[in-house]
Image (cartoon, grey):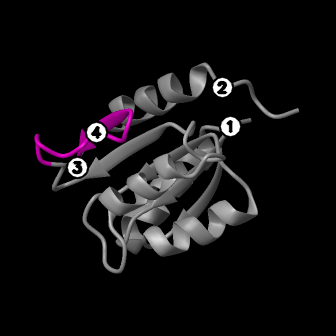
């Protein structure tokens, strides 16, 4: 079973995607901004990070930079899920980017593809 860290400042989005991902068999932890995400990452690393781009305190851009700069976390795949996706000139530190609202099938297919090459924990 793959684990996902879901990061978004909108509690309704967190609740909805958490419920959907749990129903699909994923283990899911949630954070409301990049700072909370980094605190959770100190406890254990997920198989995938899904993050909003625009959030208070620490947004997705800084969270991505922090992850890629950390030797133990740099390998983690990152999916951006945002109504305001990264601008074209941004340094790409993520593996996939989906613009809200995204159809559930596309979201879940992208999650599956990003987790596909990661062996499930034993």
The earlier-in-sequence mark between 3 and 4 is: 4
Is 8 drawn above or below residue 96 in the view shown? below
Q: Give the image location of residue 16, x and y in percent.
A: 44, 58
Q: Nearer the viewer, mark 1 or mark 4?
A: 4
The earlier-in-sequence mark between 2 and 1 is: 1
Check if residue 39 falls in the magenta segment. Answer: no
Check if residue 88 falls in the magenta segment. Answer: yes
**Tag 2 residue:** 118
SS of the residue under disc 2: loop
SS of the residue under disc 3: loop
**Tag 1 residue:** 2
Mark 3 and mark 4: span between their CA atoms? 19 Å
Residue at 41% x, 29% y: name it.
110
Q: Are marks 2 and 3 in contact (CB under 8 Å)?
A: no
Q: Mark 2 packing: few (<14 Cα in 10 Å), some, or many (20+)?
A: few
Q: Are marks 2 and 1 in contact (CB under 8 Å)?
A: yes
Residue at 35% x, 71% y: name it.
10
Q: Give the image location of residue 2, x and y in percent.
A: 68, 37
Mark 2 and mark 3: span between their CA atoms? 26 Å
Mark 3 and mark 1: span between their CA atoms? 23 Å
Please state the extent of the stretch shown in magenta in the rendering. 87-100
Q: Give the image location of residue 54, x and y in percent.
A: 25, 65
Q: Nearer the viewer, mark 2 or mark 1?
A: 2
* Residue furthest left as drawn: 88
**Tag 4 residue:** 92
Q: Give the image location of residue 73, x and y in percent.
A: 60, 47
**Tag 3 residue:** 100
Mark 2 and mark 1: span between their CA atoms? 8 Å
* Residue furthest top as drawn: 117
SS of the residue under disc 1: loop
């Amino acid at each position: 079973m793959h684990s996902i860290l879901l990061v978004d400042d909108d509690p309704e989005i967190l609740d909805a995607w958490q419920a959907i991902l749990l129903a699909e068999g994923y283990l899911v932890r949630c954070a409301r901004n990049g700072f909370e995400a980094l605190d959770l990452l100190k406890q254990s690393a997920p198989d995938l990070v899904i993050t909003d781009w625009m959030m208070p305190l620490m947004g997705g851009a800084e969270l991505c930079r922090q992850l890629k700069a950390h030797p133990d976390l740099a390998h983690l795949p990152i999916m951006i899920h945002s109504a305001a996706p990264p601008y074209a000139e941004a340094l790409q530190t993520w593996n996939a980017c989906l613009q809200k609202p995204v159809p559930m099938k596309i979201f879940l297919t992208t999650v599956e593809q990003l987790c596909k090459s990661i062996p499930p924990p034993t």
